[in-house]
Image (cartoon, rainbow, N blue to C red):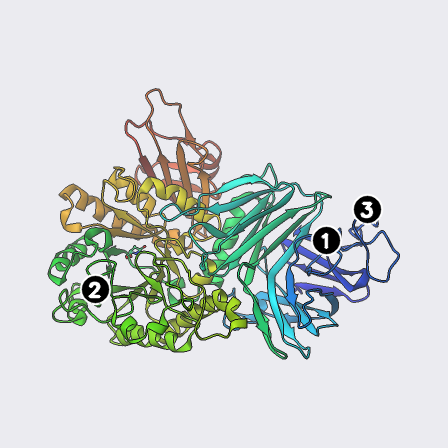
Amino acid sequence: MTKLIEVDEQQQIFHLHNEQISYLLTVEAGQTLSHLYFGKRVRGYHGQLTYPRVDRGFSGNLPGSNDRTFSKDTLPREYSSAGEMDYHLPATVVRQADGANALNLQYVGYTVLEGKPKLAGLPAAYVEDDSEAETLVITLRDEVTGLDYQLSYTIYRALPVITRSVKVVNNGAQAVQLEKVASMQLDFVDRDFEVISLPGAHVNERHPERRPVSFGVQSFESRRGTSSHQMSPFIALVDKQTDEFSGDAYGFNFVYSGNHKFSLEKDQLAQLRLLVGINDYNFTWKLEPSQSFQTPEVLMAYSDQGLNKMSQTFHQLIGKRVVRSKYRDLKRPIVVNNWEATYFDFDEEKLKPIVAEAKQLGIEMFVLDDGWFGHRDDDYSSLGDWQVFAKKFPQGLGHFADYVHNQGLKFGLWFEPEMISYDSDLYRQHPEYLMQVPNRAPSPSRSQYILDLCQAEVRDNVVEQVATILSQGQVDYVKWDMNRHLSDIYSLSLPADRQGEVYHRYVLGYYDLMERLTAKFPDVLFEGCSGGGGRFDAGVAYYMPQIWTSDNTDALARLTIQMGTSLAFPPSMMTAHVSAVPNHQTGRVTPFETRGAAAMSAVFGYELDLTKLTSAEKAAVKEQIAAYNQMRALVLEGKFYRLKSPLDSNQAAWNFVSADKKQVFVAVFNVLAQAQPYLTKTKLAGLDKDKCYRNLATGQVYGGDELMNLGFYDPVVRHDFASQTYLFEAVTEE
Ligand code: DGJ
């Protein structure tokens, strides 16, 4: 088998490559680890990218050297630190016992490993077989402090992907305070990029924004304690002419669910530095002698064929090598969730007819959302008390779960385990579990507070309460929600000099909960949620294969949200439901078929009172379910192509193509009707040009080349928010 990592020990050149990409680094003067190249695969390297020696005014030189032509301030680097002659933002800052924060990280050695080691306590991409990847670990050392930085680079054999992370080991005699440890640095010379990010808000997540990378520092970050609705932990760097199908695109996807920071710095020479890692805002980590600190991982994808290929790489990597659940390869059940149907106003008797109707319509799982526990009739109480609310389920939750199962449906249950209400038995018994700053009243959000997951006892309590319910064997699915962001950042369990660790320890605590519960209940399908898509990241995907994409269920709003999300994450990770109209978030009335087309383009379900549907709507539900059954594997496993964006036009369109290119699902949406409409065409992508495809609705057969190059006219419609779906199957030519 071809080696993926070649090391020229003489020239000190490291070449990571597969069939698609190359990544090159070397060691420069002063034992400085320097970046050479990341991009399309090259067979070899002959030294032509040695950084030119130029005397640059006000960019100083190596200590003890009179060579004015070499400066760390201009050299493309792999990992930088405070205290060097480098005026960019550094990758790491470490406060030492004497108050100094200078480091001089020098190359001391490397190892190459088969496969990919796990990251202790953290989610990360994995391999199923060591032959899938190789890992280069380079050690940089600061002699004065005795700190070692182990930079890990894993290259996958079959994907244009390199993953990166850093482990800091304190081999010195003194404790130090880490103030910043980025997971990666990537420096570019002579690239005039644009940056695509995914900002948003609650009910308005991940709206792509593309803008030039300008001089100075631009950052994309979360300081909310989670990966957030407000800024997804992802960016792409693209050339100006890059589009969905052509041009260079570099994607960076952070496998982390807490505060993140992507900073881009375009410097005096128009060179660019990208740093990705845990946000250094309110972050410190005390590292005692012999201890180590592991950063989370960044997934880097390179595409020379535009954004669709970059996204498909992430879809493949996250869908198949970050997601671990057994549901990774299983079909996900079609759900009906009672949240928008009833909110808190339900009891067993009211829910049973919805379940019975679900069975009639072919829905596969009933999900009981918020309000089944404690004495929760609204969102002011009971978080922390995960026992059934007897008023709503007088014969116990098991009785209702049995009813659901007897109807032939699976049973799902909502939890929000990281939270606590003042009005709860848990708070009355353990006020110290609530995250709070001494002598200050904590801030509510949705009238609820955060459990201090830094405390082992708190985590044990959560695991025990959730496990008690799951152990009864009646819950097939868990929706794990989180309806506020962190505040009052302090842990009563930590000493003063470790309070800067709280944000990160919270995330580690959350991962600990997820690891324990998903390992104990491997048959349960876990779905992540945080007021919709407030914690939608690859870290969560390691534990939960699917996430509620947004609390916004409006089909039109979902077009942008789902398309934006698809830049970084697979459709198999996004859940999407058909809901009632007027839509509860926007007041908009969209056609039933359009709501279906948007929801069927992801992990499909319903979120409305099925008993209130008209008979025509019930017939439509049956048709949607039949259609989804035909293409469920295609949507969950196929290649997803964005064809038209609602941000650029009056339309959105996408298609899915199966791995064997024999099945194609197309959805086209027309936002507003027009009196004198311009005609539009939809051209498909990713088909086999030599195959013939039958439109299953009309029976008409077309060549793959025709569908991709000629396309077809979109129908002229006389109503807003129209949609068309098409299912094609390859046929042998007639
Ligand atoms: C926010 C979720 O995103 C909703 O789907 C619902 O579960 C509510 N929380 C319940 O409080």
Label 1–label 3 contact, CB within 8 A: no
Which amino acid type is shown beneath numbered disc 2? Trp
Residue 486 x/y as whole percent? 41, 60
Res. 177 image quadrant = bottom right
Residue 6 x/y as whole percent? 71, 64
Residue at screen point 25% across, 37% down: 589
**Ligand 1: image quarter:** bottom left
- Which residue is disc 3 drawn over? 57
Residue 519 x/y as whole percent? 39, 74
Q: Quadrant of the N terminus?
A: bottom right
Q: Is residue 333 left or right of residue 288?
A: left
Residue lying at the far front of the rendered structure: 439
- Which residue is disc 2 drawn over? 372
Query: Closest to the observer: 282 or 132?
Result: 282
Label 3–label 2 contact, CB within 8 A: no
Residue 612 x/y as whole percent? 14, 47
Q: Nearer the viewer, mark 3 or mark 2?
A: 3
Res. 379 image quadrant = bottom left
Residue at screen point 36% across, 69% down: 434
Using the numbered discs, state the Cα–Cα distance from disc 3 to disc 2 in whole angstroms: 68 Å
Label 3: element kind: loop
Label 1–label 2 contact, CB within 8 A: no
Which amino acid type is shown beneath numbered disc 3? Gly
Q: Is residue 656 left or right of residue 306?
A: left
Q: Is residue 414 left or right of residue 132?
A: left
Count of numbered badges drawn on the protein? 3
- Which residue is disc 1 drawn over? 76
Which amino acid type is shown beneath numbered disc 1? Pro
Nearest to N terminus: mark 1 or mark 3: 3
Query: Closest to the observer: 300 or 58?
Result: 58
